[in-house]
Image: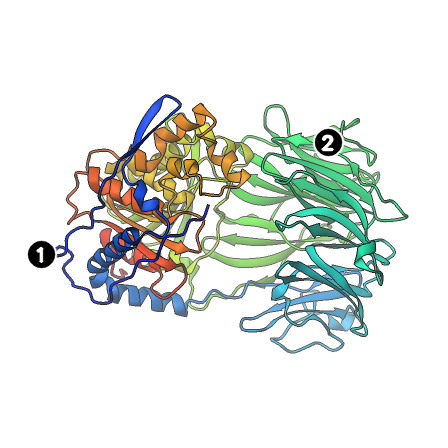
Amino acid sequence: MTQHIVPGFRSDSVSPDPDEPGFPIPYAEPRPVEHTLHGDTIGARYRWLRAHGSPEVAAHLAAENAYTDRHTARLRDLMGTLGKSLSTAVPAPQPSAPVLDGGWWYIDREQGGNDATLSRVRDHEALRGPQGLPVIRGGELLEGEQILLQDRRRVAGIAVSPDHSLFARAEVSYDGCIITVTRVETGEVVDQVLRGAGPDLVFTADGTALIHTALDELGRRHQVRRHVLGTDGADDTLLFEEPDHWAELELTPSRDGSALLIRSASPAASEVWMLELTGDHRTPRSVTGRRSGQHPVVEHAGDRLLMLRPDTGGRSTLLEAPLGTTGDEPGTAVLLTARDGEQFESIEAFADFVALQVRADGLPGVRIIPRRADGSLDTGDVRVVGRGGELDAVHLEANPEWTQRTLRYSVTSFLTPTVIAETDLVSGENTVLSRAEVPGFDAERYVERRLWATSPDGTRVPVSLMARRDVPADGTAPGILYGDGAFGTANDPVLMPETLLMLDRGVVVAIAHVRGGGEMGTDWHQQGRRLQKSNSFDDFVACADHLVATGWVAEDRLGAVGTGAGGLLVAAAANRAPERFRAVVAGTPLVDLLETLLAPDVMLTLEEWEEWGDPAENAADYHSLRSYSPAENVRETEYPAVFAWTALEGTDVPAACAAIWIAQLRERVTSDLTQRPILLRCTPTLGEDGDPRLEGVAWLLDQLGAATLEG
């Protein structure tokens, strides 16, 4: 949802005193506009701030920026220190390791700058190092190594023919991808006639044709086509077309190379078809039928199909079905059902085993299920892979070969740089293949913990917590609670330089994994969307209460931080429990949600309608939004200090949302605004010099009494 407002201007000259005479708080003038909907009348007092191109809106935003300049001027040294620390703490390149496929090692090199190549080298015994794979030394090519992509950063998709002689790439262009097929040994261009294609590329079994997606005028992958190499693109065979303009297609070849799965997915429904890659099969066959409100996962397992979908009670199930299964699913059998707190997310089949990506107790993990001699799954012998630390997140990595006897995975946590490892399916031995290097980082200085808060309805809510090891849980430390809780997004563990900056100042950093997010699976998302959105806010306040009750954070030193939908979360939580938070930072906050959804000039996606509801047409949606939309529900009481930042370009949330919320806060709260200021920073775009995110961090540290390094 993007709107544009004439840019305001940031003042270059500032004063250290924000409340000096002649520089008043920039109160917006209320201009109530009443409207009645579903029997309810509300007055939109600051709707004029939504005016596109209005000089008075530009003037108001300029005044807001100047006022914020005055308040944050004394923090410039701190901002400089934080900025310098972040600029020197450049994230280490993500680790990678050569991948073996068809007797070739494929090597992904990314070491900063312009070094982003993809190459390959033939496997042989002398090439392998101590870990059983080629040893890569910087930009030095191995003997016999061939460069496949000189710069892979503009390449959205690749495919290798079954005999590994042809290489196809989909390069990003203005109106879709340009498809180029080359003969690897010579570099000869075999085919380059396809334009406006999607990134999905799959060779047929004999390598004579390429199956790809085509884009419509909106950039949606709506067709699957078969292109015979060396022919005109106009002669391509149309294999499938998706008429639902909300749905998009995705292609996945089976690991044994015999079939192709075509997945159509929209926020409201999904369907999966199968197409044979051998012979002259030209008609995909539906294997799931159209599933409204469900997104089943299908995997081709050689002699059978494997599926993931919820049962009638909402639990994840792993099922198997014959290869000839059609939409009515005859012969489908349940193999495994998720336990409480579990969600099955994806599945990958190999000749001798199956790898299951799961989510358990809010964290991603991997499990291995062996296959018997007849190809059936031995679900009584499931093995967990890679878990060690309390907050370890384990994900499957590239595992392309059907007959491989090892499995690659990655491990991360909030205090663990990314590790790529491999487990041997026979011996059970785990080998670290590559790890990210973070100079100067000492994990022993910090601790990470999994806490569980209890929401008012009895639901247990996971909290991820990080602290410096010497910070006592005695109720004196400052703390920051992050949250998002929308669209099923999961805040999984990852090491961030920004987090270390906070920890080094004695700040306890926590993430509330509230309902509406995806940390606990699909049902967790469903419980925090639309008519049940209030659960997200109850969860966040419960997590804040738990941090204080357990002594991790001082009662008067807790800050709340959220961006986008997370801005909505922290603003609504502040309305519910303003006494719980000392300060709130909300970035590009969706805080005038009801008015935004009703605005005729704001373009929304189906995913957004599904998440928030349709207040114009649905009375229940309207009254639910009316009850929690932050701008409409500011209370006449003391509030935490507030710093909202937004931008006129480069964000999906209208800048007016933050401006209207700030105006409502200033009008209603009873706090002393000199002690608990309410500030708005609005920049022309995000990511420029003077990034408001850094300013918000400095301001928050100051509000919590944590501006200086401790220990």
Task: Indicate the quadrant where residue 11 lies.
Answer: bottom left
Classify mark 1: residues with Cα within 10 Å, few (<14), some (14-19) or many (20+).
Answer: few
Mark 2: which amino acid? Answer: Gly
Question: In the image, residue 335 lies at what x, y percent?
Answer: 71, 31
Q: Residue at x 84, y 48 (%)?
A: 277
Q: Nearer the viewer, residue 485 or 168?
A: 168
Q: Which mark is residue 68?
A: none
* Earlier-in-chain disc, 1 versus 2: 1
Q: Which mark is residue 289?
A: 2
Is residue 672 depicted above or below 634 in this figure? Answer: below
Classify mark 2: residues with Cα within 10 Å, few (<14), some (14-19) or many (20+).
Answer: some
Mark 1: which amino acid? Answer: Pro
Tag 1 residue: 21
Q: Is residue 101 left or right of residue 495?
A: right
Gap in angstroms between the C-alphas marked 1 and 2: 70 Å
Question: In the image, residue 404 lies at what x, y percent?
Answer: 76, 54
Task: Indicate the quadrant where residue 201 lies.
Answer: bottom right
Q: Is residue 705 left or right of residue 366?
A: left
